[in-house]
Image (cartoon, rainbow, N blue to C red):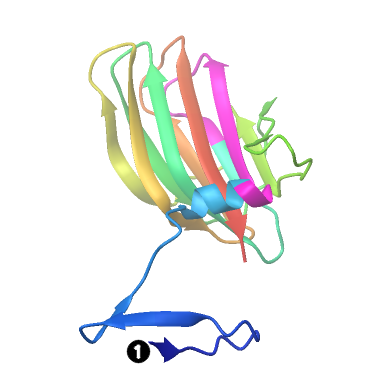
Amino acid sequence: MGIQLIDGKGTGGAAEVRNQKLVTITDGLSPLALATLDGRAYSFSNVTYDPDALDTIILLKNIHPTKNFHICDVAISCDVATEWHAHIVTAVFTQAGTLAITPVNLNSNFGNSSSIDAFGDETANTQGAIIHPHFVTTIANTSLQYNYNGALTIAPGHAFALDTVTASTAAHVSVTGYQEE
């Protein structure tokens, strides 16, 4: 015999209990996949950048008044061995990036605009809380990917940035994430 659950929406959904355990089925979609279905997931890439030492390769500032931005993945590569600093910019700053980065909605059926200002070669920020000081590409022309799975949350008015320590002629960065209240 099952237990009748009331979901408050009048659907009268039934649940099955076996051996005093609730039988459940998950939908299997990640928060990024769900956000993609709703047109709230974006990719930001700086793929043709020639950085100086200690340059900010990409900066993402959340300009939405209420929604958080959840970073899922960061992919990086460089033509030289270098150390990368992933950090939160906590001080108030005026962006001075010379390379505007266009967000790409991961669901081409939506024309939703992103509430993230994205720049490469951003020069006005100061490193705040460093999240990962040791993203290291030890061999030139190799790539690394770090999965935050949406756990890295950028609050409204705050920014995430990725800096390279060593000068190079070709650094590539891509960040994917989604917005959610």
Q: Is residue 67 visible?
A: yes
Q: Residues within 10 Å of mark 1 (few under 14, many from 20)?
A: few
In this rendering, the count of numbered labels is 1
Q: Position of residue 83 (x, y in %)?
A: 30, 28
Identify the residue at horizontal 62%, vertical 82% (top origin): 11
Q: Position of residue 169 (x, y in %)?
A: 46, 9
Please indicate whether residue 133 sits to the left or right of residue 106 in the image: left
Task: Name, please, the residue furthest toward the front.
Answer: 1
Q: Nearer the viewer, residue 72 or 57?
A: 72
Against 60, is 62 above or below? below
Identify the residue at horizontal 38%, vertical 87% (top origin): 2
Q: Nearer the viewer, residue 90 or 79?
A: 79
Q: Position of residue 94 (x, y in %)?
A: 68, 46
Quarter in which the C terminus is drawn: bottom right
Identify the residue at horizontal 71%, vertical 50% (top origin): 115
Quarter in which the N terminus is drawn: bottom left
Q: Nearer the viewer, residue 137 or 177?
A: 177
Q: Which residues are magenta?
A: 37-58
Q: Is residue 127 visible?
A: no
Against 122, is 181 above or below? below
Residue 99 quadrant: top right
Q: Secondary structure at mark 1?
A: loop
Q: Amino acid at mark 1?
A: Met
Residue 41 forms part of the magenta stretch: yes
Identify the residue at horizontal 52%, vertical 48% (top origin): 33
Q: Position of residue 135 (x, y in %)?
A: 30, 34
Query: Which residue carries the number 1 mark?
Result: 1
Please indicate whether residue 76 sits to the left or right of residue 43 in the image: left
